[in-house]
Image (cartoon, rainbow, N blue to C red):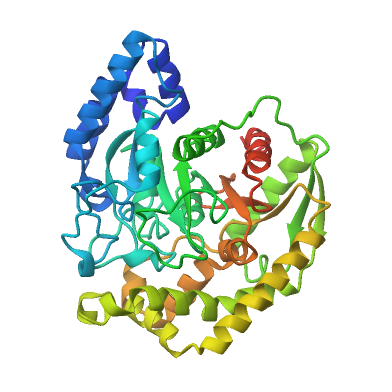
């Protein structure tokens, strides 16, 4: 049976633990063995945490034997993006600038997940300082893509996605500032959840841009994402029973999101929309011209804050950085304070208009990314190609970040092509219920 463990959902593994069919220690050893032996593992994991994982698995086994499991995921091992502090283990955020940085305590969400019984397998590779949607990182490692061994995996939670897609973890925890959970999830045929900013505590999470940073799981199913969200928050799980699309009011965002979309992502999206309609959803089309203006503000708001956070560390040794990431950070140095303040005021106004305009809908739909994963070698060799593909990779996901929503990406009929659902901030429960029904329709 162990041969099937690599690609079972976290929820199904948890159910088997509860029935006594899987021993938590055996499950953890299975994934540690895969991390040790898989030829692609060095490109996926920055470092494993076997001693910690074994101790946590033994504790989970004792709870299971005594009948005191803390929840469905108690004893299930997962991976963590290498920007979540891990006590006594290096946390370097994919950057040589932070080599050897070893925190004294866990990030708050890791502490909470551990208390909920989850087992920490280790830390996964990522885009440098989380500032790219491609997953290309020549400084540390570029993880593989499930569907194309020449392509990048998407970023910045690149290793997080690869750990799940290649069967080196049942699920993973990443972060999302402009699409860093949803792009790699979509490009590796996974489910990815971007939570609302502020819905989970960011203590011990290395920031990129604090007013946009959020935390989210990457997994095989919407149920897994819902259970992981509960484990990260310590709150009550979302009830997914009876989720349906019958009577759901969905809108396709036409502004920006459908521009220059390539053939396969368009095909996957159109097929997915048709399936959602057949499942009972009423689907209309929505124009929102202000979306283009909100997107333009990212160049001011994101880069200024990111450079403000990292300037002192970056400028002590800029030669250690991947030049294209360094250049992107440095664009924030030229932003004027008055433009930053005015930009945020305008964005907050646009968000209010968006909330009013979309109040009649249960969710808004768009392709997760308008492009397929680009070729890694060409990205390194061709500056213009890198710039174009990096901007397009996160173009659609960034709409959600700028508008302040929560969002969920689901696989479609086309490999590496996702469809996203967006709901108002704080509406993760609604989003997960809709996502559960949509997932059923798409499969």
Look at the picture and state if 119 lies above or below 92.
above
Between 176 and 56, the one nearer to me in the picture: 56
- Quadrant of the snapshot with the N terminus: top left
Residue 323 placement: quadrant? bottom left
Residue 73 placement: quadrant? top left
Between 270 and 368, the one nearer to me in the picture: 368
Query: Where in the figure is residue 10, as x and y percent of width and height?
Result: 43, 30
**169 to the left or right of 177:** left
- Can the viewer see residue 150 in this picture? yes
- Quadrant of the snapshot with the C terminus: top right
Query: Where in the figure is residue 290, as x and y percent of width and height?
Result: 73, 74
Between 360 and 376, the one nearer to me in the picture: 360
**370 to the left or right of 376:** right
Q: Residue at x 34, y 9 (%)?
A: 66
Q: Residue at x 47, y 36 (%)?
A: 228
**434 to the left or right of 154:** right
Q: Residue at x 39, y 36 (%)?
A: 113
Query: Where in the figure is residue 19, as x and y percent of width and height?
Result: 42, 10
Query: Where in the figure is residue 191, as x and y percent of width and height?
Result: 52, 43
Look at the picture and state if 12 lies above or below 144.
above
Q: Residue at x 36, y 11 (%)?
A: 21
- Can the viewer see residue 166 in this picture? no
**52 to the left or right of 426:** left
Q: How many marks?
A: 0
């Amino acid at each position: 049976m162990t041969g099937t463990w690599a690609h079972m959902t976290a929820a199904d593994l948890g159910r088997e633990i509860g029935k006594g069919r899987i021993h938590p220690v055996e499950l953890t050893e299975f994934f540690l063995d895969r991390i040790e032996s898989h030829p692609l593992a060095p490109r996926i994991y920055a470092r494993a945490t076997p001693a910690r994982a074994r101790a946590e698995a033994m504790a989970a086994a004792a709870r299971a034997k005594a009948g005191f499991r803390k929840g469905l995921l108690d004893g299930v091992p997962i991976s963590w993006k290498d920007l979540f502090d891990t006590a006594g283990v290096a946390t370097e955020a994919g950057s040589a600038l932070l080599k050897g940085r070893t925190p004294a305590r866990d990030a708050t969400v890791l502490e909470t997940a551990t208390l909920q019984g989850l087992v920490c397998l280790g830390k996964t590779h990522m885009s440098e300082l989380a500032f790219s949607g491609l997953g290309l990182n020549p400084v540390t490692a570029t993880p593989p893509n499930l569907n194309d061994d020449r392509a990048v995996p998407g970023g910045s939670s690149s290793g997080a996605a690869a750990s799940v897609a290649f069967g080196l973890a049942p699920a993973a925890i990443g972060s999302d500032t402009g699409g860093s959970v949803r792009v790699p999830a979509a490009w590796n045929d996974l489910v990815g959840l971007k939570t609302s900013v502020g819905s989970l505590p960011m203590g011990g999470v290395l920031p990129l841009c604090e007013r946009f940073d959020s935390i989210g799981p990457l997994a095989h199913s919407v149920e897994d994402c819902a259970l992981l969200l509960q484990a990260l928050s310590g709150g009550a799980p979302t009830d997914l029973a009876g989720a349906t699309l019958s009577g759901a009011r969905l809108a396709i965002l036409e502004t920006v999101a459908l521009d220059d979309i390539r053939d396969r992502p368009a095909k996957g999206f159109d097929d997915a929309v048709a399936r959602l309609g057949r499942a009972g959803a009423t689907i209309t089309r929505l124009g929102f011209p202000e979306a283009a203006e909100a997107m333009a503000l990212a160049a001011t708001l994101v880069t200024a804050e990111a450079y403000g956070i990292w300037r002192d560390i970056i400028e002590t040794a800029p030669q250690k950085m991947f030049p294209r990431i360094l250049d992107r950070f440095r664009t924030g140095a030229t932003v004027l304070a008055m433009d930053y303040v005015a930009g945020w005021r305008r964005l907050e106004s646009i968000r209010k208009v968006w909330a009013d305009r979309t109040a009649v809908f249960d969710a808004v739909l768009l392709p997760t990314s308008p492009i397929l994963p680009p070729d890694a070698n060409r990205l390194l060799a061709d500056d213009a190609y890198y710039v174009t593909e990096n901007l397009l990779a996160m173009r659609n996901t960034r709409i959600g970040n700028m508008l302040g929503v929560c969002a969920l990406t689901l696989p479609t009929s086309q490999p590496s092509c996702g469809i996203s659902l967006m709901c108002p901030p704080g509406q993760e429960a609604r989003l997960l219920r809709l996502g559960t029904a949509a997932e059923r329709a798409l499969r």
